[in-house]
Image (spheres, rainbow, N blue to C red):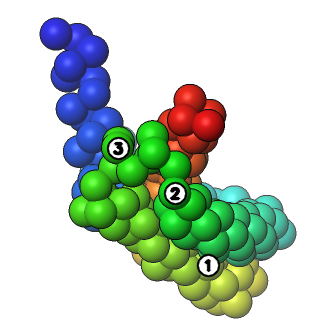
Amino acid sequence: MRSTLRSRVVQVWVQYPGLDWFAFLIPISWIIVTLKFDMPHFYVEVTPDLRKTLYQAMLGASATFAGFTLTSVSVLINLLRTPLSSIDDLFTDKVKGRVGSVFVAAIPVLGGLFLVSLIGLLTDSTRVHGNWLIQAFEIASIVSSALAIARILWVVRRLLVVTRSGS
């Protein structure tokens, strides 16, 4: 029963990448906690240089993972077009389309992280006190991007297992 529940959760997670936007619940919860306990929101009290470093790191990471995703899409296209009986037996055309949508769905999420990081770098990193709204979007984008990349890695791993066993 436990593995069935786990496999269902993973299946829903892979098939519905839009659920990643629930990552906005993390900064919303954080705001509620900080309001209740009278704490500063996110990293508004952090020095501007440290915030600038964080934004630069997220810019680099989002661009790198977007490149990884685009490269994975080309590998995926070649893999799914290759006539391997194990892949054709395992995946219908509908499932192959869903696999491709996992990769395509990650690109706007990574683009959002890149955009929010760029806005934060240009507007928030020079202020004495940071803008908590930009930081909330940054944190939600980081979580959404991490989930999208984890989904891609899961699909790639599964495809590699299938191709190894089928060849």
On the image, the x and y values in percent for residue 15 come to 27, 53
- With 67 as the anchor, is 119 left or right in this view? left
Q: Quadrant of residue 47?
A: bottom right
Q: Look at mark 2 in the image and give the residue it sits on.
A: 83
On the image, the x and y values in percent for residue 155 come to 48, 47
Q: Look at mark 1 in the image and give the residue it sits on.
A: 114
Asked whether the beta carbons under mark 3 and mark 1 sit within 8 Å of each other, the answer is no
The amino acid type of the residue labelled 1 equals Phe
- Furthest toward the top, the residue is 1
Disc 1 versus disc 2: distance between alpha carbons? 37 Å
Badge 1 marks a residue whose secondary structure is helix
Relative to 57, say whether 11 is above or below: above
Relative to 138, say whether 91 is above or below: above
- Furthest toward the left, the residue is 1
Which circle's residue, 3 or 2, is located before the other in the chain? 2
Quadrant where the N terminus lies? Answer: top left
Disc 3 versus disc 1: distance between alpha carbons? 39 Å
Badge 2 marks a residue whose secondary structure is loop
- With 120 as the anchor, is 48 left or right in this view? right
On the image, the x and y values in percent for residue 50 come to 79, 62
The amino acid type of the residue labelled 3 equals Asp
User: Does any portion of residue 31 appear in the rendered image?
Assistant: no
Q: Which residue is painted at 69% across and 69% down in the image?
A: 71
Asked whether the beta carbons under mark 3 and mark 2 sit within 8 Å of each other, the answer is no
Q: Which residue is painted at 46% across and 78% down in the image?
A: 108
Q: Look at mark 3 in the image and give the residue it sits on.
A: 89
Q: Quadrant of residue 18?
A: bottom left
On the image, the x and y values in percent for residue 106 come to 48, 68
